[in-house]
Image (cartoon, rainbow, N blue to C red):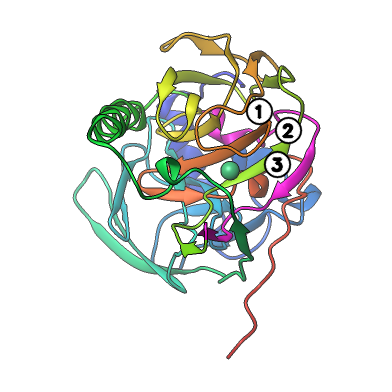
Amino acid sequence: MGPRRPRRAALALLAALPWAVGSFAAGALRAGAEERPRFEVRDATAALPMRCEGRFAQGGMAVCLAEPDARITIGEAETRADETGEFVLGFDRDAPAEESIRLVVPDGRVFTGRLPITPRRFDVSRIDGLPPSQVDQFTKEQLARIEASTARKERGDRSRAALHAFRDRFARPLAARRTSPFGAQRILNGVPARPHYGVDLAAPVGTPIVAPADGVVALADSDLYFEGAMIVLDHGQGFLSKYLHVSRIDVEAGSRVRRGQTIGAVGSRGRSTGPHLCWRLKWRDRNLDPELWLADGAGAVAEKEPR
Ligand SMILES: [Zn+2]
């Protein structure tokens, strides 16, 4: 991460931004969109004083620049630009074709606009042979464990680290074959279930998992019902990457991690049919596709065919 720009510089920068489509330089926005054509740059609309760079598709995300301390509402989700004017947005797997945005700047002016989001086509994946206790038949004790797990996960999800690491594109947490893509409609033991909100990477138990970007450990929990053991990293403002079913946790909640640092190891705990890492990404209640934020731009978007 680079040094923080002072507030005055950020304001000057914002004022200097060319609002027409074209070249500009700032923050993650300074990263050079022309070098990474897959990360699109958008003026949300001429009416919105903000610019964003990212993946404007279901499961995608963007890093944006507006006036420092601006308050932003996108759909039902809320965030705030930090003292440099930067903020991150996420677009859910089921995001509508257009997201409505409301931006309130510190002097009270209100701006509204709409951001088009590319719909995607998702696979269907069937998993059979799961124990019923991992799908839909739970004892009283299991329900109590599920409830306790949920409460701890929700605490982790409320993390809002004062970091800018969300602007850094992800490195891969491990080199492995992808066995299940993000967003697949799941059919568990023949019954339609929630979509798969992760990317599954198959690797032997004990394979090290490294942080894809700097962050703060929002959760490190080895007793979760479905996830088994899970690590959650906050890359800033609640842009949360998650590592499920791990066999080992090498970090503690609240500690800082650096890109490339080993945080744990692959396992098969919880609802898992074999050793793999289930890698997830979340912003507010929205489920994102971590592969869309990879530095190598490898996350391909299969667009939905127009009807
Ligand atoms: Zn998974």
Q: Please say whether residue 242 is visible from this viewpoint.
A: yes
Quarter of the image with the C terminus is: bottom right
> Percent position (x, y) of residue 151?
26, 30
The disc placed on residue 173 is none
Q: Tag 1, which secondary structure? A: loop
Determine which residue is flagged by label 1.
212
Determine which residue is flagged by label 2.
172
The disc placed on residue 294 is 3
Quarter of the image with the N terminus is: top right
When the figure is inspected, residue 256 is found, relative to residue 189, above or below; the finding is above
Nearest the viewer among 237 and 47 is: 237
- The quadrant where residue 278 appears: top right
Residue sitting at the far bottom:
307
Q: Which residue lies at the image location 46% right of the left edge and 63% below the top edge?
A: 191
Disc on the earlier residue, 1 or 2: 2
- Magenta residues span 164-189
